[in-house]
Amino acid sequence: MRIGYFLSCEEFTPQQLVEQAVAAERAGFEGLWISDHIQPWNSSQGHSPMVWPMIGAVAQATRLPIMTAVTCPIGRQSPLLVAHAAATCAVLNPGFRLGIGTGEALNEHLNGQGWPSFDVRLAMLREAVDLMRALWTGKPVDHRGEFFTVDDARLWTLPDTPPEIWMSGFGEKATRAAAELADGYVHTAPDAELRSLFAAESGGKPAAAGHKVAFAPTKEEGVDHAHRLWANAGLPGELAQVLPSPRHFEQASQLVTKESTASSAVAGADLDEHVAALREYADAGFDEVYVSNMGPHYLEMIEFYGEQVLPALS
């Protein structure tokens, strides 16, 4: 299983993200994910630099392949804009992949055009994927579809081969759509059932997952960081898709107890716990896992993984 590092734009400054990418390459991580948000989940996270200039900066600082995790090309960013940005990223960063999904209201309602139902967003995503792939041919594109219009558009700076598209899916319907539309699958948990569904529906395409840890000198400190910064990760159901602002996530996250966070988060510096958590993804059939650190000890976490966790999994 390939182990990469997950750059969290919600929690860190641009300079810290580049620092993490460089350290991750030095430690032996094999690739990078980077989140694509315009707002953090809550004010404690405190950041949200734009993903496209971040990819350009990271691509100059490391040679690791980068994937967005994930971009929504149907709301604040149009398929035309995303196709243009992804093509340039793929030129700067060979191996770049475009991770896509149907988005969250947190980021996508900001243009004032409302927040469509999931079925509508999925239909929009299908049209967006077709449109982006047409633009990556380098030919002029005229498109007047149900949701998007492009008038005589052509992309001039293109990679030798179009970037792969990987799609997130957190339920059966989205996972089946990912198997049809995408080159790979994205999840955030070691969900063997959905991984198996994607494999069966896609004919064996690969899958990757994101995994958060809270490395710290003690488990207690790690839990404190995880709960302070990412209690929203404990919200159930579709809340992450429908809540519209950081303050609403803060309000809802008051229902998530520190005990709940402690029971679900890998916190502290116990080697066996970190290794066991990653092995769950391998056992579930995932080909790649990208690990993000919650809290200030990210350089120590990267060093710990390079010296101990990655060798234990090799």
Image (cartoon, grey):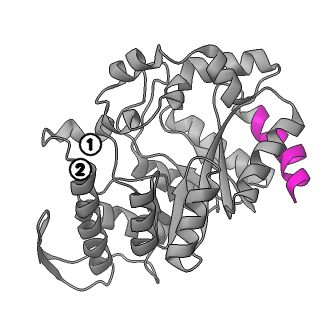
Cα distance between the residues tagged 1 and 2:
5 Å
The quarter of the displayed image where residue 305 is located:
top right
Q: Which residues are magenta?
A: 300-314
As displayed, is residue 303 above or below residue 228? below
Q: Nearer the viewer, residue 120 or 130?
A: 120
Element assignment for label 1: helix
Name the spot of residue 97 as percent of width and height, x first. 50, 66
Q: Main secondary structure of the magenta part?
A: helix
As displayed, is residue 34 above or below residue 271? below
Please state if 297 lies on the left or on the right of 186 as rendered.
right
Name the spot of residue 209 as percent of width and height, x first. 60, 53
Name the amino acid, label 1.
Glu
Please state if 260 lies on the left or on the right of 181 as rendered.
right
As displayed, is residue 192 above or below residue 46? below
- Residue assigned mark 2: 75
Name the spot of residue 237 as percent of width and height, x first. 43, 36
* Quadrant in which the C terminus appears: bottom right
- Residue assigned mark 1: 108
Residue 110 shows in the view: yes
